[in-house]
Amino acid sequence: MSTTPGLDWFKSSYSGGDGDNCIEVAVCSEAVHIRDSKDKRMRSLTVTSDAWATFVGRIVPPCPVI
């Protein structure tokens, strides 16, 4: 399977039923691993937790404060 064994991978619930057109993410204490759901044997991309938070923060608008 994956070249990064022992990780709990997840993908968005918005990926649909077939789920092969998305990325999967595994979060660790100091890193986030990202892989293509089409070929789980490929190597994952690893970024720091801070880099992932910055990336997600720029693509997802913050929730409004009510």
Image: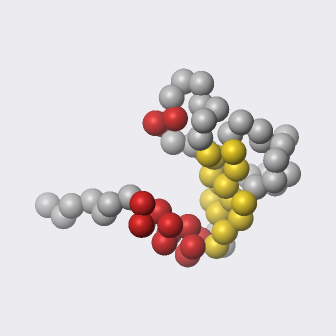
**Does residue 28 appear in the picture of this structure?**
no
Q: Would residue 4 be found to the left or right of residue 18 on screen?
A: right
- Residue 39 x, y percent position in the rendering: 77, 39
- Residue 60 x, y percent position in the rendering: 38, 58
Residue at image coords 63%, 52%:
25
Residue extending farthest to the left is 66
Quadrant hosting residue 51: bottom right
Residue at image coords 84%, 43%:
41
- Is 37 above or below relative to 34? above
| Closest to the observer, 45 or 8 | 45
Q: Would residue 25 be found to the left or right of residue 5 on screen?
A: left
| Closest to the observer, 7 or 24 | 24
**Does residue 59 appear in the picture of this structure?**
yes
Q: Would residue 61 be found to the left or right of residue 52 on screen?
A: left
Residue extending farthest to the bottom is 50
Q: How many marks?
A: 0
- Residue 47 x, y percent position in the rendering: 66, 69
- Residue 66 x, y percent position in the rendering: 14, 61
Residue at image coords 70%, 50%:
35
The N terminus: image quadrant: top right
Residue at image coords 32%, 60%:
61
